[in-house]
Image: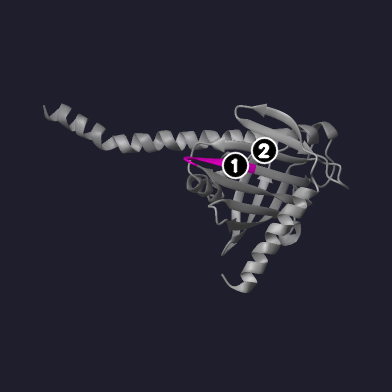
Amino acid sequence: MGSFKRVAVICGLSAVFVSAAQAEDWKVAKEEQGIKVSLSEVSGSDYKAYQGVTVIKAPLARIRALQEDVAGACAWIHECKSQKLLKHEGDQSWTYTQFNTPWPVTPRDSIIHVTTVQGADGSLMRTLEGVPAYLPEEKGYVRVAAVDGFWKLVPKGDSTEVTYQVHTEPGGSVPAMVANKFVVDAPFNTLKALKRVRRSLDRYSSLVSMLPAICIGFHGLFAG
């Protein structure tokens, strides 16, 4: 790795840890189904940061592949309506997402700059930075004003520890009741759905692996 790239990676990781340091006083808000959700106040913001942590029984490469299917990932991201990849360049990508919101909140959309760093220990860090001005605003949506967070995947034997931490400034007006519910539901439902999708893929893979034997069985049945 060239010296410039090493500096860029170090600076990128430093930015993640500085951001995390702004949300230090984590309090557990929900712990169910192997998923722990914690919240923290963020200085200067009306909205709390959220952190979801779970262990998924799947290799890191499989979780990484699910994340990198940008359009498909909308199926397990909380309240995602649609999502697409805008640009991919080396270890960086830019994504556009539209979100459903409860009445009377206007639907939101966001543009995220994602930087991926592979750790020497096999871990994977994806930093998430909102870039709201990357594209003109869409009619009928309020652009999320700021996003600051990360995904961290750490291999644990045949499983992967997944941490999803984010602080957002949703833009416009959001009732406190809606905001307080969202910061718990977003990490919990996202990680719960990610675990469910992984299990579905496992069942599909098992079925595919059985097809040759099933086909041979049917062939023998009709040949008899």
What mark, if any, has residue 52 been given in the picture? Answer: 2
Q: Name the quadrant containing residue 49.
A: top right
What's the residue at 59%, 73% (across, down)? 2
Q: Pick the quarter of the image with the N terminus.
A: bottom right
In this rendering, position of residue 133 left or right of residue 222: right
**Quadrant for the C terminus in the image:** top left
Distance, label 1 to label 2, CA atoms, is: 8 Å
Residue 219, given in percent of the width and then of the height, sits at 18, 32
| Mark 2 surroundings within 10 Å by alpha-carbon count, few (fewer than 14), some (14 through 19), many (20 or more) | many
Tell me the quarter of the picture where residue 131 sits.
bottom right
Contact, mark 1 vs mark 2 (Cβ under 8 Å): yes
- Residue 177 belongs to magenta span: no
SS at mark 1 in the image: strand
Front-lying residue, 22 or 211: 22
The foreground one among 69 and 37 is 37
Q: Where is residue 199? Give x, y as percent.
A: 48, 34
Q: From the viewer's perspective, is residue 4 above or below residue 44?
A: below
Q: Residue at x 69, y 37 (%)?
A: 186
Q: Is residue 32 left or right of residue 71?
A: right
- Tell me if I can see residue 15 in this picture: yes
Residue 104 seen in the figure: no
Q: Amino acid at mark 1?
A: Val
Write down the residue under mark 1. Answer: 162
Label of residue 120 in the image:
none
Question: How many other residues sit within 10 Å of disc 1, few (<14), some (14-19) or many (≥20)?
Answer: many
Of all residues shown, which one is farthest toward the right?
44
Which one is earlier in the sequence, the residue at label 1 or at label 2? 2
Percent from the top left, x then y, of residue 97?
66, 49
Residue at x 62%, y 69% (from the top left corner): 5
Residue stretch rendered in magenta on the structure = 157-163
Q: Would you place residue 143 above or below residue 200 in this image?
A: below
